[in-house]
Amino acid sequence: MFELIFFSLLNGIVTGLLLFMLASGLTLIFSMMGVLNFAHASFYMLGAYLAYTISLYLGFWVGLLVAPILVGLLGAMVERYGLRYVHRWGHVAELIFTFGLAFLIEEVVQFIWGKDTKAYHEPEILQFPLFTFFGQDFPAYKAFMLFISIAIFIGLLLILTKSRVGLIIQAAITKPNMTAMLGHNVPLVFMSVFGVGCALAGVAGVIAGPALGTFPGMAVVLGSIVFVIVVVGGLGSLIGAFVASLLIGLLQTFAIALDYSVNDLLQVFNITTDVDSALRDLWTLSLPQIAPILPYLLLVLILIFRPTGLFGKRET
């Protein structure tokens, strides 16, 4: 049992921090611009595909450096030549624009790379077990994912709270006109932040591609979870996104690992069930079966009891 808890805890943290890498960019974009970018997961997918292509010729490490930059530049261009013009029509137009952009990126990816899963693998230098515990190996690549995720969290937190750049960003959020009067180019700040947010999604794609697979549907798999994280953590809260990512990662991992049914839970309280009743399918329902919907149940509870999220101040 201890072995199960230990490795479930480790895998849950890895999953949660991977989700944070993806959610951090969306949180940064929303906190700066108030835009819930439906195409954010598509930039995550682009990061994986670009890194895969680059790794074929120059190796994994060059892809890790170059792919997020390319994705960030593309994101900046989307903001400059698309989203900036749509912004004048309100948030509904922004949502429709990013929603359509997500479909466009998916079609472009399928047109260029095809619909099959790509053989994108972690670098050979990280293809070894970091340690063995109770006969199970913990891959070094997962430890590398942990390191990158924590480094991103600390870096973003320091930049936004301790640096001059962070002060300008915070000022542009609350007082854009005053910030412009002080000589700062607010539209350029907006474009840069949107580009950095997309680049962070690209980093998540580069890191997750070898672990979760690189295929055209990878944006759909994690796309909805990212919005759950942002809302649960609190709209615009980086710390909230970090905590919510870990919470959802651990919740799903333990739900999959602990193979218990509703009937098992009722027996703990000495409640007997009729296996021949109309609800017999409910009694046999197990935690691994409901694991995919647990984040959405958490989202519903958060919206009912704390609409601002765990650490947020804005109403959803």
Image: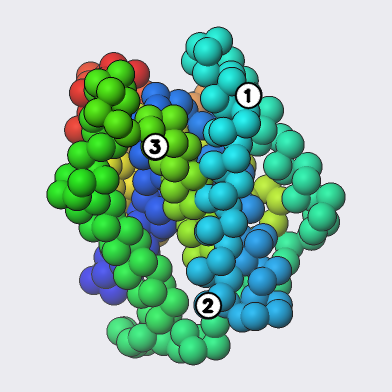
Disc 2 and disc 1 in contact, CB within 8 angstroms: no
Picture disc at residue 189: 3
Secondary structure at numbered mark 1: helix
The answer to which quarter of the image holds residue 259 is: bottom left
* Number of numbered callouts drawn: 3
Front residue of 229 and 172: 172
On-image quarter of the C terminus: top left
The picture places residue 86, in percent across and down from the top left corner, at 58, 19
Horizontally, is 42 left or right of 157 in the view? Answer: right
Residue neighbourhood size for the residue with mark 3, other residues' Cα within 10 Å, grouped as few (<14), some (14–19), many (≥20): some
Dot placed on the residue nearer the N-terminal end, 3 or 2 = 2
Residue neighbourhood size for the residue with mark 2, other residues' Cα within 10 Å, grouped as few (<14), some (14–19), many (≥20): some
Q: Which residue is mark 1?
A: 97
Horizontally, is 89 left or right of 155 in the view? Answer: right
* Disc 3 residue type (three-letter): Val
Dot placed on the residue nearer the N-terminal end, 1 or 3 = 1
Task: Give the label, 3 or 2, closer to the camera.
Answer: 3
Residue neighbourhood size for the residue with mark 1, other residues' Cα within 10 Å, grouped as few (<14), some (14–19), many (≥20): some
Spatial separation of the CA atoms under disc 2 and disc 1: 33 Å
Disc 3 and disc 2 in contact, CB within 8 angstroms: no
Secondary structure at numbered mark 3: helix
Front residue of 161 and 219: 161
